[in-house]
Amino acid sequence: MKAKVLAALAATMAVSATCAFAANPFVDVPTDSWAYKSVVELADAGVIQGVDGEYFQGQRNITRYEAAEMVAKAMAHMDKATVEQRALINKLADEYADELNNLGVRVSNLENKVGNIKFTGDARLRYRYQSSSHFTNFKGDNVARGKENDNSWDYRIRVRGTAQVNDRTTATVGLSSDNQNFGSNDSSSSAENDVYADIINVDYNFGSPNWTLSLGRTADWKLGGPRSYGYQYGDTIDRAELKYQNDSIAVTAGYGKFKEAGGNDSWAAGSRFVGSGDDFDGLKMGYGEIEGFFNNGSAVGVYYSQFDRSNGSYTESADQSIEDTFDADNLWGAYANVNFGSKWNLLVNYESLDKSGYSWTTGNKVSDPEVWIARLTYGKASMAQPKSWDIWVEYLDAEDGAWLGGSTGSWRNFGQIDNIESWGVGIDYVFAKNAKFSIMQSFASDYKDKGIDKYGQNDDELTRAEFNFAF
């Protein structure tokens, strides 16, 4: 192992050597050794230090952790390497990925110096089943809800490219397919099968790792940040965001405009406000969040959002108005994400809307609805660790009108996210590196307020299963 790693690293480190040869630092490496040139170059570049600063011990097998440290140090010089040399270092980095991850912050700091573009991506094959039902909406249309047969299956593919522009600036571009439904009768090349940019983002730090300015479009964004549940939203937004973060606290402030109305995931289409899916069209929002972190990985946070529906292409009609479809002035929420023991995690999330309008689900007038969510998880499924797994149980209590109506970061949909008290259970299993299988099931669901009519609601439970692949 030592000869293989040594030869590979020596080839890459030659580009950063400040002189042809420095003095041999190791007494046990003679000048006629096959490894003499490589050892001296690596020692001069700081990749190896030897034992006690005096002995190389070339006959001793190195550990994978020691090899990973050598690879990490080589990564610090990738901005000076050729394309072929970068490919070689990347190959070694893949080989020792787990050990590099265990090095933590030190490796992260080294990766920030890399001058090349890193491409990643993911693919999802998803199955969602809920028995279809038909109802008559307020316009008299017969509308079907639920997912059955081919309509239960869809897929999505995403690709991301990240470039370290300089020591302070990182640029990210991401492309995503829409959620393509296998039940569609359109051709695979039809205009319905769109690919769009869901990330066009630049991150800039101010010479300090604590302050970051983020500008542009980002995906998978949700109110409350990544540690909250994501009940209200979990999709694409154009925003400017300033964040201060250290080991114990994070303060975030931003302003943005939603760019994804919900589409396939929003059940607003076909409900009381038929066929729009535009409940977030033109919606702007200012937001702020304060989070606290603890040594065991636990976190707590509070957040506030102020909404502004000042423009957009939504057209009012005699049957509905913007005030009907979106009449929330602001929202505030709080979460606690607590680790206890070695494998347990409890997430509790609360949100309250300053809202006086109509409910998506019942057509009733609502006032300041609230939602409580709790999830208890055992284990941790890590895409980098085959055979890792977790299992969780969830409780949701959402008052009528608590959901704003757009896309959600929750696994729930099809009318199972508003005006409801429901339980859910799920399991995630990483069956191979970067390949995970998940299954979720709702149960004991009960709609809280039957209202004028159960527009779009479905009494049947929701089953969801999916394969996720990272590359």
Image (cartoon, rainbow, N blue to C red):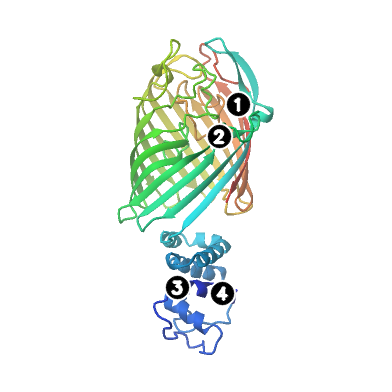
Against 219, is 297 above or below?
below
Against 168, is 347 above or below?
above
- Tell me which label, 1 or 4, sits earlier in the chain: 4
Q: Quadrant of residue 1?
A: bottom right
Q: On residue 444, which mark appears?
A: 1
Q: Which residue: 51% across, 74% down?
A: 11
Secondary structure type for disc 4: loop
Q: Amino acid at mark 3?
A: Val
Task: Give the CA separation, mark 2 to mark 1.
Answer: 16 Å
Pointer 3 residue? 15
Quick one: label 3, few (<14), some, or many (20+) residues within 10 Å? Answer: some
Q: Is residue 227 visible?
A: no
Q: Amino acid at mark 2?
A: Trp
Residue 451 vs residue 203, the one in the foreground = 203
Task: Give the CA separation, mark 1 to mark 3.
Answer: 64 Å
Q: On residue 404, which mark appears?
A: none
Task: Give the CA separation, mark 4 to mark 2.
Answer: 45 Å
Pointer 2 residue? 411
Marks 2, 1: nearer the viewer: 2
Describe residue 363's horizontal placement relative to residue 469 as left or right. left
- Tell me which label, 3 or 4, sits earlier in the chain: 3
Describe residue 155's horizontal placement relative to residue 334 as left or right. right
Task: Give the CA separation, mark 3 to mark 2.
Answer: 49 Å
Q: Quadrant of residue 366?
A: top left
